[in-house]
Image: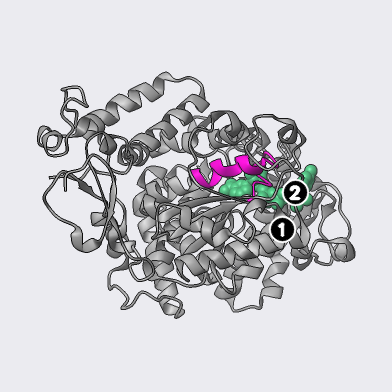
Amino acid sequence: MASNGVSGLDMEKKSGGGGGVEDIYGEDSATEDQLVTPRTVSVASGYTLLRDPHHNKGLAFTEKERDAHYLRGLLPPAVLNQDLQEKRLMHNLRQYKVPLQRYMAMMDLQERNERLFYKLLIDNVEELLPVVYTPTVGEACQKYGSIFRRPQGLYISLKEKGKILEVLKNWPERSIQVIVVTDGERILGLGDLGCQGMGIPVGKLSLYTALGGLRPSACLPVTIDVGTNNEQLLKDEFYIGLKQRRATGQEYAELLHEFMCAVKQNYGERVLVQFEDFANHNAFELLAKYSKTHLVFNDDIQGTASVVLAGLIASLKLVGGSLAEHTFLFLGAGEAGTGIAELIALEISKQTKAPLEETRKKIWLVDSKGLIVHSRMESLQHFKKPWAHEHESIRALLDAVKSIKPTVLIGSSGVGKTFTKEVVEAMTSFNEKPLILALSNPTSQSECTAEEAYTWSKGRAIFASGSPFDPVEYNGKLFVPGQANNAYIFPGFGLGLIMSGAIRVHEDMLLAASEALAAQVTQENYDKGLIYPPFCNIRKISAHIAANVAAKAYQLGLASRLPRPEHLVKYAESCMYSPVYRSYL
Ligand code: NAD
C-alpha cells in the first residue's frame, strides 16, 4: 500500500498500516454531511505528501513520521514543532512592509501547509485579518491578474453555460457546505473588478474556517464571470477573465439560475450559498428570488444588518432606552443602509408587537438626492420605497439632522468626510450621548474619524466604524472605538445554519445572531465605550452566535439535523475545525 503518490480509495480500504496519510477529517467531521456525498479516502506519502497542502507539516514531521511516510532526505534534519513554525512565520511576515507582500506570503502558506495557515490566522486574528481580508484583499483583487498563481476557487463563466453541473464536479472536494459566490461587479468600494473578484470568496471562506470553524474542504469559493465593464481590465493583456462587457438581463439571470440549480442538485438542500459583492440591483433580486428555494445569505445586506443591530442593542446599555425609543437617520440607502434599517424595524416590531409599517417610521434615510420622502416615491428604487415617509423635501444631511433630530446617525453611503463638525455638533446639541456609526470603507471613505467624533462631541459620542481606528485620548480619557466588522457575524451564523442542517435562512435567525453578539459585550468593554466585544475571542463569540442561530432554526422547524443537541454552545465548539497537526502514525 505504500506508494509515492495519491490514490482514491474506498472507505473500507482505510487501513492503519502502510505509508500513506488518510484524507479524513477527524475531529472536525461533525459538520460533515455524509448523506449527500460518499466519502473517499486518498493516501499520500513521500514527495507527494510534502506537496499536499491538506497534510503537509513541513519541518514538523517527526522522526517516526519521516520514516513511516518515505520522507527521509526530502526534508532537512531539524524537526520544528507547530508553535515554532508559527513563531518563525510570524517573524517573517512582520518583515514585509508592504501589505500585499504579507497577503501573498499568507496565500503561499495556504497553498503549502493549510493547517499552519489556519493556526497563524486563528492565533493572530487581529493582526492577520486585515491581511487576508479588508483592506489588503481589495488591493489583491485589483492586482489579481498579475499575482495569480494557482486557482483557489471555481471560475464559472458564460463559456460554461449549459455545463455548470459538470464544472462543479471538477472541484476536488465533494462534501461542500458553504459556497461564497461573487460576480465581481462591486468589489468592496473598488467597483467592477470582474473575474479578479475571486480574492473575495477566497478571503471570506478562509474566515469561515478560522473564525467559524468550518472545515476548509467544505468551503467552495466561486466567481461567476459574465464579463466586466471595467475599461482598464478590458484593455489589460494580463486580465484573467472574459474580455467582454457584462451580460445583463435574461442572459445573466439564466446563468445564475443554472448555477443555483446545479449547486442544489450537486450538494443538496443544506448547502449555504453566500452572495458577496454583487451590485445592489442584482444583490437584492438574487436574495429575494432564491431565499424561497435555497439556503442563501447576503453578507452585504443581511450580515451588515445583523452586526450593526448587535452594536445598537449593546449600545442601549450606554445610551439608555429601548430601541423603539430611538430615532435613526442614515446617510446612504443602498445594500448596507436599507438592510440595517429593515432589521432594526423588524427587531422593534418583535419587541413592541407594532406592525413593521409603523416601526419603519422611526427610521429615516438620506441618499444622494436628499431625504427619502413620500413626494419622491415615483422615482425611487423599489428597496427605498418603504422608507419614503411624509416630510418636506430636504437636500442636505445637516438640515435633515436638525429637522429629524435623530439619536442615532449611521453612515453607509461610501462617501467620506460627510459627518462634518457641524453635523456632529448638531447631534450633540440634542443628545446627551449621540450614537454615531461611520460605516463606510475604506478608512479614507469613513464619514468621520474616531478622533473627530470624540473631539467634536466633546467626548460624548458613542462611536463605531466600518474601518478600524486606533483608540483616542480626549481630555485625559481613553476612548476605544468599536469596529462593526461583518466578520463578527457571518462565520458563526453560517456555522449555526450548518450544524442544525437548516434549509432556509429566516430573518429571526439574523435577530438571534445580533442578540448573541450583543450579549458578548462585557462591562469592562462598556467602560471603554466599546459596543462590540474584542475580536481576539472570536471563536467563542462565533460558537455563541451559532448556538443562538441553530436554536432559532430548531424552534422554527427549519432544522433538519435531528435530534437537536442539548447543549448547543458546546456542540458548536465541538464541530469546529482545529488547525493543530494530527499524528500520522
Ligand atoms: P451601495 O452602493 O449599495 O449604497 C450606497 C448608497 O449611498 C446609495 O443609496 C447611494 O444613493 C448613496 N449615496 C451615494 N453617494 C451619496 C452621497 N453623496 N450622499 C448621500 N448618499 C449617497 O453600497 P453599500 O453596499 O450599501 O455600501 C455602502 C458603504 O457601506 C460602503 O462604503 C461599504 O464599505 C460600507 N459597508 C460597511 C459595512 C460594515 O461596516 N460592516 C458593511 C457593508 C458595507
- 399 left or right of 413 in image: right
Asked if residue 82 is positioned above or below residue 252 in the image, the reply reads: above
Asked if residue 502 is positioned above or below residue 284 in the image, the reply reads: below
**How many circles with numbers are drawn on the protein?**
2
**Marks 1 and 2 close (CB-CB < 8 Å):** yes
Q: Amino acid at mark 2?
A: Arg
Q: How far apart in space, not on screen, are marks 1 and 2 (Cα)?
A: 8 Å
In the rendered image, residue 49, in percent from the top left (x then y), is placed at: 26, 38
Secondary element under disc 2, as helix, strand or loop, is: loop
- Magenta span contains residue 191: yes
Give the class, few, some or many, for how many residues have Cα within 10 Å of label 2's Cα (few <14, many ≥20): some
- Colouring: one colour
Asked if residue 77 can be seen in this view, the reply is yes
Residue 40 in which image quadrant: bottom left
In the rendered image, residue 404, in percent from the top left (x then y), is placed at: 76, 57
Which label number is shown at residue 423? none
- Name the residue at 71% across, 34% down: 233
Q: Amino acid at mark 1?
A: Tyr
- The span picked out in magenta is 183-203
- Magenta span contains residue 115: no
Residue 235 in which image quadrant: top right
Residue in the foreground of this view, choosing between 195 and 214:
195
- Name the residue at 33% across, 65% down: 38
Secondary element under disc 1, as helix, strand or loop, is: helix
- 155 left or right of 541 in image: right
In the rendered image, residue 253, in percent from the top left (x then y), is placed at: 70, 62
- 31 left or right of 387 in image: left
Instruction: From the image, tell me which residue sits under label 1.
Output: 252
Instruction: From the image, tell me which residue sits under label 2.
Output: 246
- Name the residue at 52% across, 71% down: 508
- Name the residue at 51% across, 39% down: 133
